Amino acid sequence: MTEIARLIAANEGYAAARANVADARPGRRLAVVTCMDARIDVFAVLGLHLGEAHVIRNAGGRVTDDVLRSLAISSHLLGVDTVAVMQHTKCGLAGVSDEELREVTGADLGFYPIAHHATALREDIDVLTRTPYLAPIRVVAGFVYDVESGEIDDVVRWERPT
């Protein structure tokens, strides 16, 4: 059976038993930005359920232009006021440079490598909090998920002054 056939077969079972969440707005007014790493079960790690949060994933869990685009929609149209940015240990973007990643991939891109998680989280949260059109966001937190222990380290927090 091909991977695509497996996906279609799995969907048949899911569709028959799925929970129906009617509202696109996340029930906890929360968005999570995290890495695409297959070892991270975002909902289980953070105790979330379907319909409670938007999950935005990319390589490294970094705040990129596309993350800003998604958060603009989440905050202005769908009620999100809290964002958690969650990086993780043993990330493929940790300890490498843009130059090394360009050489390996052949892509002339900025890859947002991570020299140090706390520094990268502070940089990303600074981008979020300085982006004028994200004013509806009231709280931002930066976490590092340990892929071995399953625990998160609460690295940085920010709250919009009232």
Image (tube, grey):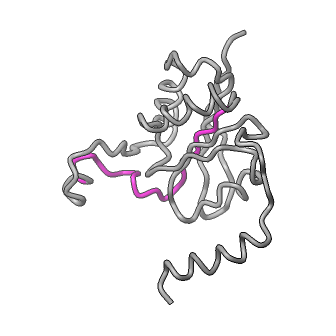
Counting labels gives 0
Percent across and percent down for residue 28 are: 78, 38
Q: Quadrant of the C terminus?
A: top right
**98 in magenta:** yes
State the extent of the magenta-drawn residues as a range. Answer: 82-100
Which residue is at 55% across, 48% downward? 34
Judge by depth and name the residue closer to the eye, 146 or 101.
Answer: 101
State the image quarter where residue 82 is shown: top right
Q: Is residue 92 above or below residue 4?
A: above
Residue found farthest to the bottom: 1
Viewed as shown, does residue 53 lie left or right of 34? right
Viewed as shown, does residue 61 lie left or right of 104? right
Residue found farthest to the top: 162
Q: Is residue 99 above or below residue 13?
A: above
Which residue is at 53% across, 18% downward? 133
**89 in magenta:** yes
Judge by depth and name the residue closer to the eye, 153 or 133.
Answer: 133
Percent across and percent down for residue 23 are: 76, 43
Which residue is at 53% across, 82% downward? 5
Q: Is residue 144 above or below residue 71?
A: below
Percent across and percent down for residue 64 are: 42, 37
State the image quarter where residue 9 is shown: bottom right
Judge by depth and name the residue closer to the eye, 132 or 77.
Answer: 77
State the image quarter where residue 151 is shown: bottom right
Which residue is at 61% across, 52% downward? 145
Percent across and percent down for residue 55 are: 61, 47
